[in-house]
Amino acid sequence: MNWQPDFLENEFVKLVPLAESHFEQLYVVASDPLIWEQHPNKNRYQLNVFKNFFEGAILSKGAFLITDAKTNEAIGSSRFCNYNPDKDSIEIGYTFYARKCWGKPYNRSTKQLMINYALEKVNVIHFYVGAENIRSQKAMEKLGAIKLGELLMPYYGEPDRLNFQYQIDRHLWDANILK
């Protein structure tokens, strides 16, 4: 299953497969401590911590560099991970954006591209949001995701953290006017 197509694009964002060569430009975005303020792993702005995050992204074989479709400037990252063929599901997560993108259509546009792509291959998409990450919880609700519960989530090379699990399935998305 290909979870890293050559690109996904709309009028706001372009998602390209994350490559080692993207490290510097993505770290420029990620080095802002306020991006991680509500995140379970608040020190990802630190170079060594971000290197670990980036390594996990590359190893996932489903990560993307998100660029502004108009300027081609790096603005964040997201990924597909934890594909489960038995449950016909995939996870979308590890998403972050430059602060200048907050409150603008970038997150919704990215998620719409990724959800539409994933639902061509699976019936269920999961999202895990840090228990303290109110901003991302609200974004999930705006997308129409259903909150399923709370659980401790493992992070690549980092401690487990409490997250809320959200879900969108094909039936819900097809009925959702936001797609």
Image (cartoon, helix red, strand yellow):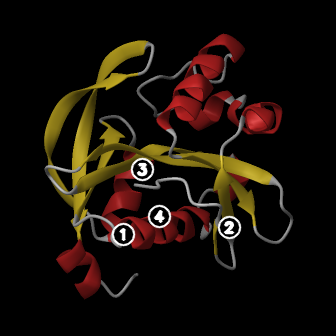
Q: Secondary structure at mark 1?
A: helix
Q: Nearer the viewer, residue 40 or 128?
A: 128
Placement of the N terminus among the 4 image quadrants: bottom left
Looking at the image, is mark 2 or mark 1 earlier in the sequence? 2
Closer to viewer: mark 2 or mark 1: 2
Which residue sits at x=61%, y=56%?
Answer: 102
**Residue 114's disc number:** 4
Q: Are marks 3 and 2 in contact (CB under 8 Å)?
A: no
Q: Which residue is mark 3?
A: 136
Left-right relation of 78 to 132? right
In the image, what residue type sits under mark 1? Answer: Leu
Q: Nearer the viewer, residue 145 or 1?
A: 1
In the image, what residue type sits under mark 3? Answer: Ser
Cα–Cα span, label 3 and label 2: 18 Å
Which residue sits at x=30%, y=18%?
Answer: 160
Looking at the image, is mark 4 or mark 3 earlier in the sequence? 4
Measured as percent of width and height from the top left, residue 153 is found at 27, 27
Q: Are marks 1 and 3 in contact (CB under 8 Å)?
A: no
Q: Which residue is mark 2?
A: 13
Cα–Cα span, label 2 and label 1: 17 Å
Say if residue 44 shows up in the picture. yes
Closer to viewer: mark 4 or mark 3: 4
| Vertical position of residue 160 compared to residue 153: above or below | above
Looking at the image, is mark 1 or mark 4 earlier in the sequence? 4
Closer to viewer: mark 3 or mark 2: 2
Q: Secondary structure at mark 4?
A: helix
Which residue sits at x=67%, y=16%?
Answer: 46
Cα–Cα span, label 4 and label 3: 16 Å
Q: Secondary structure at mark 3?
A: helix
Left-right relation of 102 to 126? right
Closer to viewer: mark 2 or mark 4: 4
In the image, what residue type sits under mark 4? Answer: Met
